[in-house]
Amino acid sequence: MAEIVVVRHGQTEWSAGGRHTSTTDLDLTPEGEEGAKSLARALAPRSFVAVIASPRKRALRTAELAGLLVTDVDNDVAEWNYGAYEGLTTPEIRAADPGWDLWTDGCPDGETPEQVTVRLDRFIAKLRPMLALGDVAVVSHGHASRALAARWLEQPVAFGAHLTLGTATVSVLGHEHETPSLRLWNAPPV
């Protein structure tokens, strides 16, 4: 069966500093550009019936440097909207809201876990007919990709908390017989 190849964008200044980045449209750092280029080797042996990217320039630039031709830009794979927590680190957020957890609480003026679930379920429904034709690449972000994997595995979005994901990595979602499975996770470029 066909697979979903999930590519997390290369490093940005904010991802390097642990700052929550959703709608802020940042460029890749020089290290992020090198990481994105190195993804090309891991992706070269595959052919894709579609390459779907987040509209953020860090995702689009990663796709370009990795040698992927984006066929669709989709807001459903954009990063979790952090709302009032945009640009803050988890320790900064917890200084004001000690019990805060993205995966269960969401963000004030941003998205809830339920809203993220709805949009990623919609995205997965869009992917299913494509997977009948072949592999699909998805170029996205840290929390959004982790939530996508959770929903693919038919788990609550909060399951994504257990799936560490570095920048400029490749992950693969597929099937074990008919059961959705995690085939590869958080693989750095070779």
Image (cartoon, rainbow, N blue to C red):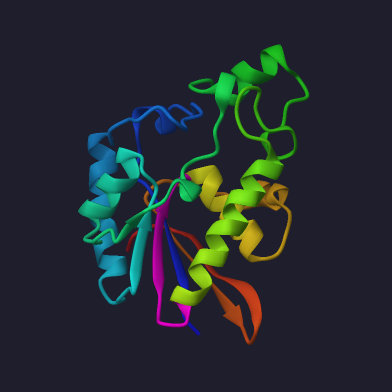
Residue at (46%, 80%) from the top-left corner? 2
The question of residue 26 being in magenta is answered with no
The question of residue 136 being in magenta is answered with yes
Quadrant placement of the C terminus: bottom left
Q: What stretch is highlighted in magenta?
A: 131-141
In the drawing, does residue 188 fall left or right of residue 66? right
69 versus 174 height, above or below: above
Question: Farthest top residue?
Answer: 96
121 versus 184 height, above or below: above
Task: Confirm whether residue 57 shows in the render.
Answer: yes
Question: Farthest right residue?
Answer: 99
Residue at (22%, 53%) from the top-left corner? 64
36 versus 115 height, above or below: below
Task: Confirm whether residue 89 shows in the render.
Answer: no
Residue 105 location (% of width, % of height): 73, 32
Residue 38 location (% of width, % of height): 25, 56
Residue 77 location (% of width, % of height): 48, 49
Residue at (50%, 85%) from the top-left corner? 1
Give the total of numbered labels: 0
In the drawing, does residue 53 fall left or right of residue 179? left
User: Residue 31 appears in which quarter of the rendering?
Assistant: top left
124 versus 92 height, above or below: below
Residue at (27%, 34%) from the top-left corner? 29
In the drawing, does residue 56 fall left or right of residue 155? left
User: Residue 17 appears in which quarter of the rendering?
Assistant: top left
User: Residue 100 appears in which quarter of the rendering?
Assistant: top right
